[in-house]
Image: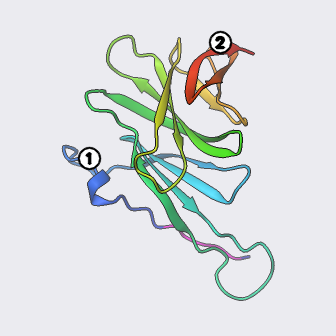
Amino acid sequence: MASHTLSLQLPPELQPSQQKRTPVPVHAAFAFTQDLLAILWEHGVIQVYDLQTRLGPGRGKVMDPVLVCSRSLSSAGSVRSFRQAAFTTLGDELRLAVLATELAGDANDIVSVADVGPSQDAQVTEIGLPKHSSRLVLSRTVVWEAPDGRLYEGMPHGSGFAGGRLL
C-alpha cells in the first residue's frame, strides 16, 4: 500500500496580515469528475491541487500533486466564518462552491461559487441563503441543506446564480 503526504502552505500574499497565529485548513473536498483536491482555509483562501494519482501498479510516486489555483474569497469589509467547500459543475465547467456565514448583520449563510483554474481574475458569484447553519450537499449543481432538512438548489442565471428553489 502506497501513501503520500501533501505539505500545505499558503503563499505569503494570501496570508492574513493581522492574525497572530498560523491559519489552518478547515475543510477538504474531492472533485467527482477529476483528480482534484480543494483545501479551504479558515480565512477564506481556497487551494486546488491536481493530485495526478497513479492508479495502476508500478514503480515511482503514487501521486505527484500540482497546485492548480490559490485564491482568496474574502471580500473587503466583510467578516465571514468559512466552513465548507464542494466541487460543482455548470455545463462542462468545474467550479468550487464555498459556504460561509456572514458574521455581521443577520448572520445568514453565503455560498461563493468560483471557477477552478489558474486565473486570479476569475469571477466569483455569491448566493445569499435565507438561513444560517446550512451545509452544502454533493451534487452536480449548487445544492444546500437548510437546518430544517429542506434542500435548495442555486439556479444558473446568465453568468451567475439567482436565488434558489426548494427541491
Q: Could you tell me if residue 149 is visible in this image?
A: no
Q: In the drawing, does residue 126 fall left or right of residue 104?
A: right
Q: Amino acid at mark 2?
A: Asp
Quickly name the residue at label 2. 148
Crowding near pointer 1: few (<14 within 10 Å), some, many (20+)? some
Q: On the rendered image, what quadrant is the N terminus found in?
A: bottom right
Position of the C terminus by quadrant: top right
Query: Which residue extends farthest bottom?
Result: 59
- Identify the amino acid type marked 1: Pro
Up the image or down, 130 lies above or below 133; here it is: above
> Residue tagged by mark 1?
16
Q: Residue at x 51, y 40 (%)?
A: 114
SS of the residue under disc 1: loop
Magenta stretch prevailing secondary structure: loop
The answer for how far apart the CA atoms under marks 2 and 1 are is: 35 Å
- Image quadrant assignment for residue 74: top left
Residue 35: image location, x then y, percent: 68, 60
Q: Image point 52% across, 53% down: which residue?
A: 117
Residue 122 is situated, as x and y percent measured from the top left of the image, at: 46, 44
Q: Quadrant of residue 73?
A: top left
Marks 2 & 1, CB-CB < 8 Å contact? no
Give the magenta-colored segment's residue range: 2-6
* x 67%, y 13%: residue: 165
Q: Nearer the viewer, residue 150 or 32?
A: 32
Asked whether 31 falls inside the magenta stretch, the response is no
